[in-house]
Image (cartoon, rainbow, N blue to C red):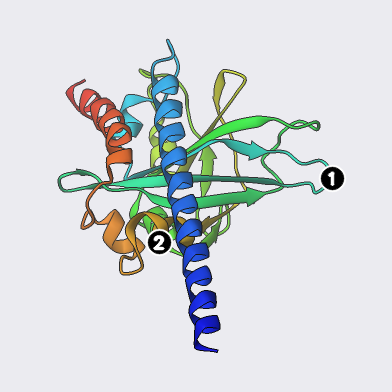
Amino acid sequence: MLKRILIVTTLVLLVTLTAVASDRDDDVNRTNKATQVFKEIMNTPDQGIPSDLLESAKCIAIIPGDVKFAFIFGGNYGRGLATCRTGHGWSAPIFLAIEGGSVGYQIGGSSTDLVMLFMNDHALKSLLSDKFKLGADASVAAGPVGRNAAAGTDLKLNAEILSYSRSKGVFIGVSLNGAVVQADKSGDRAMYGDDVNRHEILDGKVAVPESAQALLHEIGGYAHEAKLQ
């Protein structure tokens, strides 16, 4: 009987460790994809996020190429990450998911990168919640495009979240009204362990994992460039 218990316990432990390792690999993969997406968008001539918006954003969320339109189910689903500005740079990322049926993709399916800028404290508070709806719990608007474009004052003042999409190489502002953003706590646990919460991560109290260094370097570089302009 004791031997059977030990065998079952060992198997459960192995399954748990395998699942955690798999989740961590997924976190690393998402981080690498997010880095690539941000770099490609900002390196596109005459495109990208306006410099002044990037400099004033409190947080940036990136959902890399996993959001697909499903005609049968009428919805979209994707997973990504978010990082926030701290007193000493950008925070380690938290992991999140987005789903909703009103993003506006064409029937037949598409793979689309999403980027969201969280512009004020209320938007940040929404990001820290377990789940919130864009357009209802936090106002969202299609963001202007162009590295040197002048973002309108009204847009800055009224929109809590500015959103963008990139599909087939085209980067545009897009309305995400009705989409739901929720915490991916399993992703956070896999990367940071059970004793760390999302507030601590985004406050900069958690060390940045090696897999996220390149992403934060890219974001920090463009934000610094914007500040000098």
Of discs 1 and 2, which sits in the foreground?
2
Residue 201, image x and y in percent?
29, 57
Circles 1 and 2: CB atoms closer than 8 Å: no
Residue in front for this viewpoint, 50 or 101: 101
Tell me which residue sits at (32%, 40%) in the image. Answer: 212
Q: Is residue 179 visible?
A: no
Q: Which mark is residue 104?
A: none
Residue at (25, 47) in percent of width and height: 208
Residue 17 image offset from top left, x and y in percent = 45, 61
- Mark 1 vs mark 2: which is more N-terminal? 1
| Residue displayed at 52% across by 75% down | 7
Q: Does residue 201 appear anywhere in the picture? A: yes
User: What is the three-letter code of the residue carrying label 1?
Assistant: Ile
Along the line of sight, the residue nearer the viewer: 29 or 93: 29
Report the number of numbered marks: 2
Which quadrant of the view contains residue 46? top left
Apparent side of residue 67 relative to residue 198 in the rendered image (left or right)? right
Q: In the rendered view of the protein, which quadrant contains the C terminus? A: top left
Q: Is residue 206 above or below residue 219?
A: below
The quarter of the picture where the N terminus appears is bottom right
Res 43 → quadrant: top left
Residue 189, disc: 2
Most extreme residue toward the left, as rendered? 88
Residue 2 % position (x, y):
50, 88
At label 2, which amino acid type do we have? Arg
The residue at the far bottom in this view is 1
Q: Is residue 116 left or right of residue 222?
A: right
- How would you rate the neighbour count of disc 1 (Cα within 10 Å): few for under 14, some for 14-19, many for 20 or more? few
Where does label 1 land, which residue? 72
Residue 181 falls left or right of residue 53: right
- Residue placed furthest toward the top: 45
